[in-house]
Image: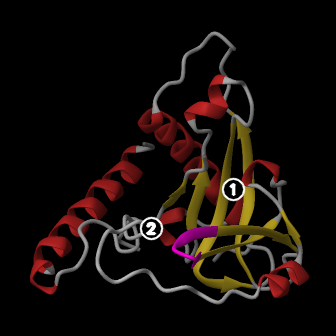
Amino acid sequence: MGSMRRRVTQRSNTPMLFALLVVLALVGVACSSTADADADSPPGIPGIGDSGSDSASAPPTTTFDIDAAYDLGDPIEFHQAQMGECLNEYDWVQDRQPRNLLIALDCSLPHDKEVYLIDVFDAGPDVPYPGEELMKDIATRKCYNQFANFVGQTYEDSQFDIDLTFPPRENYLVGNYRDIICMVTSSEQTVGSAKGSGL
């Protein structure tokens, strides 16, 4: 699979091949943005930077069945996720405000992602925050290195993507939630664990 598919989730880079894929993806996005300029497409990655717009047309209010989501499992925060846990993440806009809900559920149910690595960033209390880019690089490297061991297939040949979270500055500085969380995800929901699937 030729394009870079990693997602990075932030709440509040990697082996050379992986870094090359990142560069190729960014070049592709830049070219796409230039080509679509006449269509008034937003610059950058679609869906990023769209909320909070000052445009004349207000973002639509989305009806979201929160009770149905709660019926699937338990609401959690990312730092509460457990190894092997499957998750559904819901994003919607209500009253012009972005909303987000994370549900932990059984992997036998259709889900968005599955946690395959939780690794605490190893640094003493006196070590300053390394910066968002370096933190992202560290997290990406850890997630990439453990991907094949979990899925049973290399990242490059897998149908799955990598999603990850890493500690933001405010949590790092107070010593809370220094977890790097790596998740297997896909463009569509999956049923069952990706562990050892070879997909």
Indicate the quadrant where residue 139 lies.
Answer: top right
Indicate the quadrant where residue 180 lies.
Answer: top right
Split into 4 quadrants, where in the image is the C terminus? bottom right
Instruction: Looking at the image, tell me whether mark 2 or mark 1 is earlier in sequence order.
Output: 2
Determine whether the residue tagged by mark 2 lies in a helix, strand or loop: loop
Indicate the quadrant where residue 61 lies.
Answer: bottom right
44 is higher (above) or lower (below) than 174 = below
Q: Mark 2 or 1, which is nearer the eye?
A: 2
Residue type beneath disc 1:
Asn
Q: Which residues are magenta?
A: 93-99
Residue plotted at (23% across, 68% down): 43
| 94 is within the stretch colored magenta | yes
108 is higher (above) or lower (below) than 147 = below
Residue plotted at (49% across, 25% down): 130
Instruction: Give the camera-side residue of 18 and 126.
Output: 126
Residue type beneath disc 2:
Arg
Which residue is identified by label 1? 149
